Amino acid sequence: GPMCQRLTALLWVKPAKMADKTCTIRTRKFITNRLLQRKQFVIDVLHPGRPNVSKAELKEKLASTYDVKDQQCIFLFGFRTQFGGGKSTGFGLIYDDVKAAKQFEPKYRLIRNGLDKKIEKSRKQKKERRNRARKVRGAKKNTSAGKK
């Protein structure tokens, strides 16, 4: 009934206690990639009785497991929940420092992790700029187009 729903809502407000019981993380294919200054791995999350586990929560767990000082160095993406639920698989990267992350990660993932700002430019602006650049051929291209 409604009381029951209220109780479950209360339980979900503070998932920390529940999460410890219901979410297990395993990492597979763990590689230390010195060239890109990071550790990379596949993450399997077992979460029976839960629809899914937030990336923020997984970050916290990984940070404590691999003693990462700055959680912004942890990038999690590409999560797919298996059919029937209870298990998700995704990909994780832990950079040695924020500098390395900024150097090697694609912009959209930096934005998601809060290491970069999204520049809101309208579609029309971009198209107009591109067409202006098309008209001017050769070495003069950058001068007339203006700054990005």
Image (spheres, helix red, strand yellow):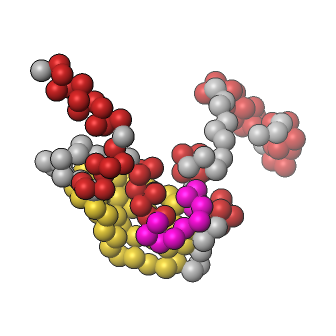
* Residue closest to the eye, 136 or 107: 107
Horizontal side of 24 relative to 94 (left or right) equals: left
Res. 74 visible in picture: yes
Horizontal side of 12 relative to 123 (left or right) equals: left
Res. 93 visible in picture: no
Identify the residue at horizontal 47%, vertical 72% (top origin): 66
Q: Is residue 126 magenta?
A: no
Q: Residue furthest top?
A: 2
Q: Position of residue 126 (x, y in %)?
A: 66, 31
Identify the residue at horizontal 54%, vertical 46% (top origin): 112
Q: Position of residue 94 (x, y in %)?
A: 52, 67
Q: Is residue 56 above or below residue 30?
A: above
Q: Position of residue 140 (x, y in %)?
A: 86, 44
Q: Split into 4 quadrants, where in the image is the C terminus?
A: top right
Q: Split into 4 quadrants, where in the image is the N terminus?
A: top left
Identify the residue at horizontal 34%, vertical 52% (top origin): 79
Magenta part of the chain: 64-73
Horizontal side of 30 relative to 98 (left or right) equals: left
